[in-house]
Amino acid sequence: MAFARTIGHTTYRFPDLRDLLAKASPRRSGDELAGVAAGGEAERVAARMALADLPLARLLAEPVVPYEEDAVTRLVCDGHDAAAFAPLASLTVGGFRDWLLSDAADAAALAAVAPGLTPEMAAAVSKIMRNQDLIAVARKVRVTTAFRSTIGLPGRLAVRLQPNHPTDDAEGIAASILDGLLYGCGDAVIGINPATDSPAAMVRLLHLIDEVRRRYDIPTQSCVLAHVTTAMAVMAEGAPVDLVFQSIAGTEKANDSFGITLPMLAEAREQALALQRGTVGDNVMYFETGQGSALSADAHWGCDQQTIEARAYGVARAFSPLLVNTVVGFIGPEYLYDGKQIIRAGLEDHFCGKLLGLPMGVDVCYTNHCEADQDDMDTLLTLLGAAGVAFVMGVPGADDIMLNYQSTSFHDALYVRSTLGLKPAPEFEDWLARMAIADAAGRIRPALAATRRLLPAQAGAGEGAA
Amino acid sequence: MSGGGGPDEPWAFLRRHTAARIALGRAGDGLPTAPLLRFQAAWAEARDSLKSSLDAEALAARLAPLGLPVETVRSQAADGAEYLKRPDLGRRLHPDDAARLAPGRWDAVFVVADGLSVRAVESHAAPLLEAVLKRLGGWSVGPLVVAQRARVALADDVGAALGAAMTVILIGERPGLSSPDSLGAYLTWAPQRGRPNSDRNCLSNIRPEGLAIDAAAFKLAWLMAEARRLTLTGVGLKDAAPDLIPGGAEPPPALG
C-alpha cells in the first residue's frame, strides 16, 4: 500500500514500506549511492510524517525483505514474541517514540518489550528521533552480559584492547597489550584483528593473549577476529578460544558474501560453550556490524542502510553475544560521508542494538578518505558515554597500524571515563587496584612497581627507572 | 618524547617492537602536547597524499622490463571525487578499454591498480611482481593490466575480458597514519562480474615495514598454486602457507 504526505503545495508519495523507511532516513551518502534516499529535505520530512502514523504492527506484517527469500527475515519473524509485543501492538511509530521517552518506559519495561520488537521497528522509530532522543532512550536500557568480566552495568564503560600489528608480530602485539593494560584498558576483550586469516596464525595469537591473561590473572577474555570457520577449525584442535568472532549483516545474501550461514553461527557457539571457559558468565559470541556492508555486497534489497543494519542486530540477538560492535566509520565516505553522518549513524546503531537487547559497543572511527577528524570522534565518544555505551575501542594512540584507520585510544577511554564518572567492569576495576595500576581514587596512575611487575624480564633496570 | 617536559613512560623501550603509538605518556588522563601534534602531522600527510593520482603511463614503463605486455585501463569513475563516492563505478571496466583487451587462455592475469594509495602501487607493485613471477615457472601469465580509479572487483571485468582462470589484483590500500604505502593483493578464481568478496583471498599490508616483498611473493605464489590445485579461492582456501620463507630468518622469540 502506498503512502502520501503533503508539505506546502507538494504531495510526496512513497510506493511501499521500504521506500518510506529509506526516504525518512537522515541524509547519508550510502543511501544516495543506493539511489533510495529522499530527493530533498521536504520529501524527507514528509516521509517521517507518514512513518510516524504507521502502525507498528505493519512493520511486523510486511517484512522489508521477503520471508520466503531471506533467512534473516525468517529468524526475526519466527522468533518474534507476540506476548512481549502486546502492550505496544496498538501504537503507531510516532506513539512508540513518545512511549520510549515517557517515564513509563523504564529499564524494566524496556527489557520486557525487547523480545517483541523487530529490527524494522527499532529502525523506523530511530528515523523520527533526534540525536538527543537516541541518547536519552538508550541510556535507560540495561543490557548486561558476562564471560570473565561483566559488561554493560550502569555507570561502567569497558574497553576492547585492540593491539593489532601489520604482520601479527608477537612482540609487537604484546607491547601494545601491555600499553593498554597500563592505561587501564582491556576489560571488554583483548581482541586482535589478524593480518591473515590462517588457522596457524590464529592459534599462535590465541596462545599469546591467553598466556598474558593467565600470567597476570586478568579478568578479561581474548579473541582473534578470524572468520568463524577458522575459529571452528582451531577449536576442534583444542585451541584456547574464549569468544567466537564474526562480522554479520542484515540479509542472507550479505551474510553469504561474508561466507556465513545462521546454522554455522549456531554450531560455532555450541562449540565455544562446550569449552566452558567463562567464569562469571557464558556469553561466547562477539559480533561486528556496520552500516553499508549489505549494499557493498549488493544485498540490500532496495532498503536503506540503517534499516538493514538494525536487521543485523536481529541476527546477533539470536546468539546471546557478549559484545556487539558497530564499526561505524570504518567503511568509508561512500556510505558515511563526514563526521556529521558518522555521529548520527553511531547513535542510531547504539540505540537500535540496545533497544533490541544487545550489549552494544561502538568503534568510534573514521578513515583518512572521510571528511572527519579526531574532534568528530571526541564528540561521538562523549555522546555515546552519555548514552550508556557498553564498550568502545582502545587502540594505541588511536592509530590502528594494521587496519589503517583511526579509532579511539586508551587516552580517549580514560577521558570519557573520568569526564562522565564511568568505571571499568567491576572485576577489572578490582584487578587494576590490585595491580596498583589505578590509585586509591580509581584514576589510572600506574605505580612504578606495577609497571615493573607487568613488563617483560628483559627490561633494563636503567630503562625502567625513568 | 612524552611532551610537556614530562619523563618517558617506564615502558617506552617497548617501542622498538612496534610502530604502534605506545607509551605516549599522559597529561592528566589526556595526551601530552608532543604526541598530540605528531598525530595531527601524520593525519595531515595522509590527507594530502590522497589527492595525488596515478601516472599510468609511467607505471606501465616501469613494468615493461618484466617481459609481459602491459595494458592500461580505466574504471567507469570519471574523476577522484566520483571514485570515492561511487564504488560501483570503480568496479566496472570502461567499455572502450574492455573492447581493447584481447581474449586468451591464461592461467593468471595480474592487475595493478591505484586504489586509495598511489604511493603503494608506485613503490611496491614492480618489485612484488618481479618476485612473484620468478616463482611461477610453467604458468601462462597474461598481460599486466594497469588500472586507474579501480576497486578490487574491477579485476573481475578484466579477467573475464582476457579469459583468465584467475586474477590477482595488486591495489593501494587506504592510507593509514603510519602506513601511507600499504599494498593489498586479492586473488579470484574464475573471475566474472558479481563475484562476492567471500570468493576472494587477500594479503594485506604489503610494504617493507609490514609484509615484506619477498614474504608476500612467497605467500602469493603459494596461494595461487593452491587456488589452481583446488580450483577455487575464498573461504574454502585457507592461508595455511608456512610462516617462514625457506632459508629466511627465524622469527623473533615471543615476548617473555
Image: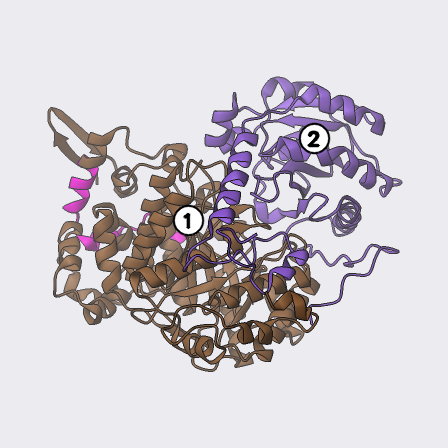
For residue A372, above or below residue A136 = above
Residue that extends furthest to the front in the rendered view of this protein: B5
Compared to A309, does A179 lie above or below?
below
Disc 2 marks a residue whose amino acid type is Glu
**Chain whose colour in the figure is purple:** B
At label 1, which amino acid type do we have?
Val
Q: Residue B9 vs residue B182: left or right?
A: left
Judging by the rendered image, the residue that carries numbered circle 1 is A328
Q: Which residues are magenta?
A: A46-69
The question of residue A62 being in magenta is answered with yes
- Residue A172 in the image: state x and y as whole percent: 65, 59
Badge 1: few (under 14), some or many (20 or more) residues near its Cα, within 10 Å?
many
Compute the Cα span from label 1 to label 2: 31 Å
Marks 1 & 2 on one chain: no
Query: Within 10 angstroms of label 2, few (less than 14), some, or many (20 or more) residues?
Result: many
Q: In which quadrant of the rendered image does the C terminus of chain B lie?
A: bottom right
Residue at the spot of label 2: B122
Residue B227 seen from this side: yes
Q: Which residue: 52% across, 70% down?
A: A243
Magenta region includes residue A335: no
Whole-percent x and y of residue A30? 40, 37
Residue A240 shows in the view: no
Where does the image place residue A94, in percent across and percent down from the top left?
A: 15, 50
Which element carries disc 2, helix, strand or loop? helix
| Mark nearer the viewer, 1 or 2 | 2
- Label 1 marks which chain's residue? A
Q: Colour of chain A?
A: brown
Which residue appears at 38% of the width and 44% of the height? A375
